[in-house]
Image (cartoon, grey):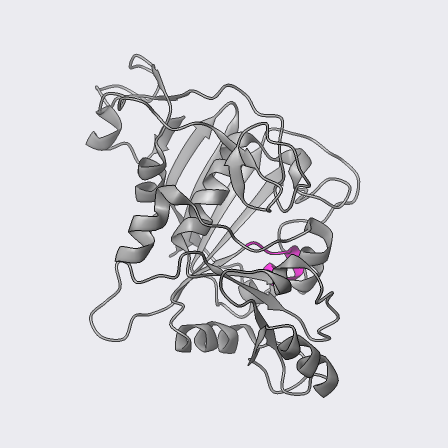
Amino acid sequence: MRRLFPVTEETAAQAPAGGARTLGRSPEGEVGPAGQDGAAGARGAAGAGPAGGVVRPPVGGPVGAAAVVDREWSLAELAAAYAYPEPAPGAPRPWLRANMVSSLDGAAQHEGRSQPISSATDMRIFGTLRALADVVVVGAETVRQEGYRPARVRDEFAGARAAAGQTPVPAIAIVTASLELDFTLPLFTSPLVPTLILTGAAAAPDRIAAAERAGAQVVIAGEGMGVEPARAVQALAGLGHTRLLTEGGPRLLGQLIAAEALDELCLTLSPTLTAGNAQRIAGGPSVAVPHRFGLASLLEQDGFLFGRYCRS
């Protein structure tokens, strides 16, 4: 993997001994060893390129002038590259980041799923972002289409999560107005931490009762049927979840953008073309004025670009 921006002294470091394996999808809907079979969830098991990455030391001249060092990035390096901002003194401010993938022609999925435009390195970053988060916020339709399962323990991150006062795994928070969910799925029957359901005050009482019987924690985050994005962020922060991650889908991300609730976008640009009429990474009504984000970092692996953009 190459770090394209910014280039710092960190990128000149020699390759660490015994870099981490390239990771792919596991049947549990989390990240596991590449090549493991099983039902894929969001950004599912992808046909990956080589496991090794490259980094260019900043030794004068433009990027590309220096010798290329072939190596893998360790999970610790990825975690440092994607670390959440340090909280300010006093009550920590919630930070909401999104993680999405797009083809070169703007498709967020192919035939209803994001897996065909993903890669093993993309999935490795996907797993790292989950391991850093307190909670993963996702729309109900994405839960249905992508086969979401409970997050599982990642031994590589267990110590860091404990030191940060986090639960062993992030909670999954589902945004839904109707609560039309299958409560017999593992997301409700066998999570390590209770699944959260974000809904509005006007949601059907019988569906709320069914969710609570299934062990989910229902959080009211809107006055009507739907969820108000800013209120959802504050409700999660009130539960102690300040490191927030959303994995979409496009409709939910569009709502978060329109409400100016998004602080950061981690975008994988896949070197693929799909044509067709697939959704973009964000849908819904257009904002009155485009929201400007600044480039925080840019990585490259096998033609995939992994960008971090933060609110300007």
Q: Does residue 249 show up magenta in the picture?
A: yes
> Residue sitting at 37 percent across and 30 percent down?
4
User: For the N terminus, which image quadrant?
Assistant: top left
> Residue sitting at 52 percent across and 53 percent down?
151
Measured as percent of width and height from the top left, residue 308 is found at 42, 45
Q: Is residue 41 left or right of residue 156?
A: right
> Residue sitting at 63 percent across and 39 percent down?
44
**Numbered range of the magenta stretch:** 247-253
Residue 105 seen anywhere in this rendered image of the structure: no
Outermost residue toward the top?
A: 67
Q: Quadrant of residue 63?
A: top left
Residue 278 seen anywhere in this rendered image of the structure: yes
* Number of on-image labels: 0
Q: Tell which of 177 and 134 is nearer to you.
A: 134
Q: Is residue 197 left or right of residue 302?
A: right
Measured as percent of width and height from the top left, residue 53 is found at 41, 22
For residue 170, above or below residue 300? below
